[in-house]
Amino acid sequence: MPYEINETHDPNLKSWVESANDPATDFPIQNLPFCEFDTLAEGEEELEGLPKDGGVGVLIGDHVLSLVSCEAEGLIEKELGRSDELGDIMDFASFSTSTPRILSRLRRVVSGILRKDGKRIARRPAAKSRILYRQSDVRFSEMIVCNYTDFYASIHHATTVGAMFRPDNPLLPNYKWVPIGYHGRASSIVPSGTTITRPRGQTKADDAAAPTFGPCKLLDYEMEVGFFVGRGNDIGAPINIEQAEDHIFGLCLVNDWSARDMQKWEYQPLGPFLAKNFATTVSPYVVTMEALAPFRCPAMKRPDGDPAPLPHLFSERDQKLGGIDITLEVFLTSKQMRDRNLSPIRLSKGSFKDMYWTIAQLLTHHASNGCNMQPGDLLASGTISGQSPDSRGCLLELTWDGPGKPRKPIELPTGEKRTFLEDGDEVIMKGYCEREGFRRIGFGECRGIIAPAPGSAR
Ligand code: MN
């Protein structure tokens, strides 16, 4: 069942954490995304070998609420009654095994702790300093990802990219029937802010007789949204589309860094491999499905003449509310721009509602053969591109100017030009939801700077 809108979404709710009431924050009290963090205790960490605090936190304004400390202060269990239902809240993996009902109860408790007129915290103001940290004083890690799968769910992306290779027949015949994906690699998923080393690999120019091995020359980003599996399914027991969203814990931003020249040489016949698995950046916060309830929308309307999804991928409710209206933006700075204090330039702006397949369909499809999905699995949407050229979610599409034509570079304020990423470039992705009558919520940032390939001089 999709989550309903309740008092935790009330746009008039305010928090005693003042920064959460700033209209520009991504993390007002109506959002409450989960994160994995530890505190940077100066000196102490080295001595003790242990952080002061950490584990699962909730983002609020420019602070993090420690759930471990909330529990230690007795702020959670009394509210929840049977706390054993929650599992061990210090362990993110057990969060993921929680049901929507428990997650919903926890959201109400956290909302109650953080709201300005909250009674329990008002009686114990001293506890505030023991449960809250500045984001600038903590370190975020990516959520532990068990398995990673990347899809290709934007028909606009698939059509534009397909047209580069097959101008007359851009979409392959399976596209409208089966969600296309590949198994990625969980070990190289890194949190926002991690430096990305330019990969080296095999590439082959069209007119060359043999490939060469060296630094990737056509490095790209892909703007994507990822979702975490909460409760899993047993092997051999598929997930029904009507229940699919009950298995989804929440969403984050994903940058699927891509080495286009390596990809072109290696992708046939088994799909992407080393062109993708050298690094994938995620925003280290998980916006829950319940927080997104006000921003649900119909699934993308299939153009006339397109086949309806097969019955196991079709649900009336999913068609009606399976979309999520998340605005996504990509920005770029070069090293020169940062040295000259120039603001990042925006490369594109698109929306997650323009996807051909909903997240429920992607998850249902993934488990439809009996594949067992596990708590902490990350499934990403594929590059999110809309119909208009300024909504294209990667440079492969953005700088493409039509079949047979040279790529059209993007000009930076410094006069530098880009068709693909150069060393020192930083890619910054942002995502947020807005709707009349509701508080704007955001996903934070997903950023990464490109470092030179090993062994190459700058
Ligand atoms: Mn991708």
Image: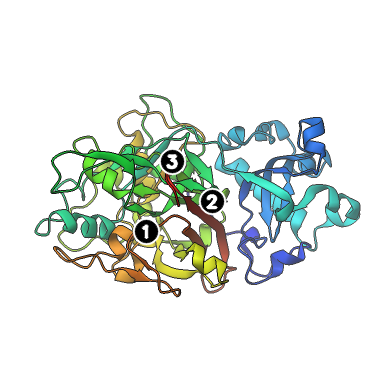
Q: Secondary structure at mark 1?
A: helix
Across and down, in percent, residue 80 comes to: 73, 41
Reading the image, the residue beneath label 3 is 455
- Considering depth in this image, is 147 or 219 the residue closer to the camera? 219
Reading the image, the residue beneath label 1 is 320
Residue at the outermost left position: 168
Q: Is residue 140 above or below residue 274?
A: below
Amino acid at pointer 1: Lys
**What's the distance in space between the residues labelled 2 and 3, CA to CA?**
29 Å
**What's the distance in space between the residues labelled 1 and 3, CA to CA?**
53 Å
Mark sitting earlier along the chain (1/3): 1
Reading the image, the residue beneath label 2 is 283
Say if residue 109 shows up in the picture.
no
Across and down, in percent, residue 451 comes to: 48, 49
Instruction: State how many labels appear.
Output: 3
Mark sitting earlier along the chain (2/3): 2
